[in-house]
Image (tube, rainbow, N blue to C red):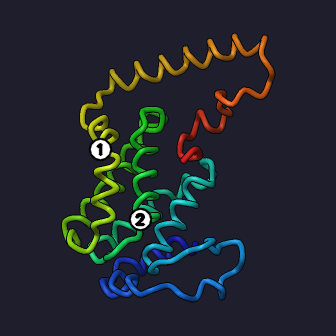
Amino acid sequence: MCVFVLQTMSVEPAFGKNMNKKFEAQDTLPPSIRLPNFRGSYADFLIVSIHTLITGSKGKLEAIYPALLAIINNMAAYVESLTVPTCSKLMQLFASMSNPSFLLANESNHTLLQSLLESINTIIEHQYAANSNLVYSILRTRKKVETLRIFTLEGGQQELENLARNQKEATNGASAAPLSSPMRSTSTEARNPLSRA
């Protein structure tokens, strides 16, 4: 319920502009939602918290992913001076959502990636000079951007088939090896690559 209230509030331009104020009252928050060593604005706090909700839920909050990304999109035109950790979290979301295993997991996942890309584009379009950390983060992940640019359905399906074959071979080979192989992913990770971000 709170996510949808926040989504409604985020439509207002004043909300986006006020998100640039420095966030100093973290000690007033319940311990479960505090971010250790956090330094940044309300926008930084909100984006990092959304990243945590999406990646930490392991798919259990999948129904509210569109609303969470809409919040970022709604305030994107007003966000200034995002910190390096916040920009890294945005690009981690991009890397996870542009992964073929996520894109092809269900027929609506591409809309989540589209929403995230629209948010990043809006930040750059409206606040380019004030968000050099984001531009730098994008440049650092340019290989992932290029991979998405040349992505095809056939290529993605082939990559998933190769991954499944490799996992099957690893599982067959692991029967002789110890049970706790660090290369094997859990079934939750296989279904939801966002939990690995």
Task: Name the quadrant of the N terminus.
Answer: bottom right
**Side of 160 where 114 appears, left or right:** left
Q: Residue at x 40, y 49 (%)?
A: 94
Q: Quadrant of residue 100?
A: top left
Comes first in the chain, label 2 or label 1:
2
Please tell me which residue lies in front, 109 or 185.
Answer: 185
* Label 1 packing within 10 angstroms: few (<14), some (14-19), many (20+): few
Q: Residue at x 50, y 74 (%)?
A: 45
User: Eyeballing the image, is 130 above or below 125?
Assistant: below
3D distance between C-alphas at marks 2 and 1: 16 Å
* Label 2 packing within 10 angstroms: few (<14), some (14-19), many (20+): some
**Side of 181 where 12 appears, left or right:** left
Q: Position of residue 181 (x, y in %)?
A: 72, 26
What residue type is disc 1 on? Arg
What residue type is disc 2 on? Val
Q: Position of residue 104 (x, y in %)?
A: 43, 33
**Side of 53 where 6 appears, left or right:** left
Q: Which residue is mark 1?
A: 142
User: Eyeballing the image, is 29 above or below 105?
Assistant: below
User: Eyeballing the image, is 123 above or below 17?
Assistant: above
Q: Quadrant of residue 77?
A: bottom left
Q: Residue at x 64, y 16 (%)?
A: 170
**Labelled pair 2, 1 in contact (Cβ < 8 Å):** no
Q: Position of residue 179 (x, y in %)?
A: 80, 24
Mark 2 element type: helix
Q: Which residue is mark 2?
A: 84
The mark tally for this picture is 2
Mark 1 element type: helix
| Residue 155 badge | none
Please tell me which residue lies in front, 106 or 72.
Answer: 72
Q: Residue at x 65, y 38 (%)?
A: 188
